[in-house]
Image (cartoon, rainbow, N blue to C red):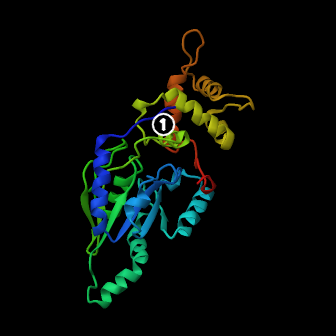
């Protein structure tokens, strides 16, 4: 599947991030816990210029818990502070301010020695579209400050958000790379809604997803859709089986696989199928 999606405002965002980085004390990078590798912008290492980094594994409530622990260890091993959150429900976001101050403990101590105790800490928040960044910021700030929609690319301009008297966040528009050189990365982003469905073949996407789930999380499909998974079943055949069980039968006995494809994606993204992680640290 050839996915090409790089709106012009994302080029502008990259430039703005680079310009603002010198004013930051730390960077908060929000990732989708289901796809921590695919939901990272590969330019972040260069853009953050060695700043202390807090990695937020968001949507942890939808990810495989055992896999999330492995990802925590992976990022901690790279020197990052790590917290798990489910921003939509507000779980884990209360640990953010403490995690930032712990990350910057030596820097804050140095400020205090110079008589600058209470100096405002500024943190840039980065995340690709639809990773839950605006919802996370709203939870951390305790009020609705950032526009949150379940739609890629809603935040279009930078904005400062005050968390408390000593901590401010710089929200940035979601940034994504210009091309998906690795097809798997593109698929993972599409599965989770980071790429607009309008630019995808939804039926093909769902065939790929259901085939992956059948291989790695088959029991979840059996429980949700009451289907049997045969060793030779293709993704399309599994989609047909699920559609038949749901009663999506057209005139002449044909299965409405397009309708089933949309249902599958909606239920996967909404966490109704279960908790899945689509990539592991060894994939890095």
Residue 236, above or below 143: above
Q: Residue at x 53, y 64 (%)?
A: 75
Q: Is residue 76 above or below residue 199?
A: below
In this picture, residue 42 sits left or right of residue 133? right
> Residue furthest toward the right?
231
Closer-to-camera residue (94/109): 109
Q: Which residue is mark 1?
A: 266
Instruction: Using the rendered view, name the quadrant where residue 139 is placed.
Output: bottom left
With respect to residue 157, does 108 lie above or below? below
Where residue 60 sits: x, y (%)?
51, 55
Q: Nearer the viewer, residue 33 or 135?
A: 33
For residue 225, what is the image quadrant? top right
Whole-percent x, y for residue 88 in the image: 41, 53
Q: Nearer the viewer, residue 99 or 250?
A: 99
Residue 249 vs residue 200, the one in the foreground: 200
Classify 246 as above or below 52: above
127 lies left or right of 249:
left
Q: Residue at x 63, y 38 (%)?
A: 212
Residue placed furthest toward the top:
252
Q: Residue 164 at what x, y percent from top left?
A: 28, 71
Regarding residue 94, the answer to whether it shows in the image is: yes
Report the residue at 37% width, 60% height from top: 47
- State left or right for residue 274 relative to residue 7: right
Q: Residue at x 37, y 42 (%)?
A: 152
Instruction: Characterize the local packing of mark 1: few (<14), some (14-19) or many (20 or more) Cα atoms within 10 angstroms.
Output: some
Q: Secondary structure at mark 1?
A: helix
Quadrant location of the C terminus in the rendered image: bottom right
User: In this view of the protein, can residue 139 be seen by the observer?
Assistant: no
Q: Quadrant of residue 245?
A: top right
Give percent across and percent down for residue 103. Answer: 43, 75
């Amino acid at each position: 599947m050839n996915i090409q999606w790089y709106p012009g405002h994302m080029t502008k965002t990259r430039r703005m991030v680079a310009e603002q980085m010198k004013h930051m004390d730390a960077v908060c990078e929000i990732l989708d816990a289901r796809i921590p590798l695919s939901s990272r912008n590969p330019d972040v290492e260069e853009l953050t210029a060695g700043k202390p980094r807090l990695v937020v594994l968001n949507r942890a409530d939808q990810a495989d818990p055992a896999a999330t622990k492995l990802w925590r260890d992976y990022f901690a091993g790279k020197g990052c502070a790590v917290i798990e959150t489910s921003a939509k429900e507000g779980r884990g976001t209360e640990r953010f301010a403490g995690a930032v101050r712990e990350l910057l403990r030596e820097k804050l101590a140095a400020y205090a020695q110079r008589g600058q105790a209470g100096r405002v800490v500024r943190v840039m928040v980065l995340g690709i579209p639809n990773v839950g960044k605006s919802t996370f910021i709203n939870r951390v700030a305790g009020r609705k400050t950032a526009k949150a929609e379940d739609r890629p690319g809603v935040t279009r301009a930078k904005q400062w958000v005050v968390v408390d008297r000593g901590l401010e966040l710089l929200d940035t528009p979601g940034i994504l790379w210009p091309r998906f050189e690795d097809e798997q990365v593109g698929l993972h982003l599409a599965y989770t809604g980071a790429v607009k469905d309008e630019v995808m073949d939804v039926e093909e996407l769902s065939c790929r997803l259901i085939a992956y789930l059948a291989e790695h999380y088959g029991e979840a499909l059996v429980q949700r859709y009451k289907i049997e998974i045969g060793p030779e079943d293709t993704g399309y055949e599994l989609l047909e089986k699920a559609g038949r069980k749901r009663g999506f039968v057209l005139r002449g006995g044909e299965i409405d696989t397009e309708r089933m494809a949309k249902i599958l994606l909606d239920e996967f993204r909404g966490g109704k199928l279960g908790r899945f992680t689509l990539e592991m640290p060894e994939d890095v």
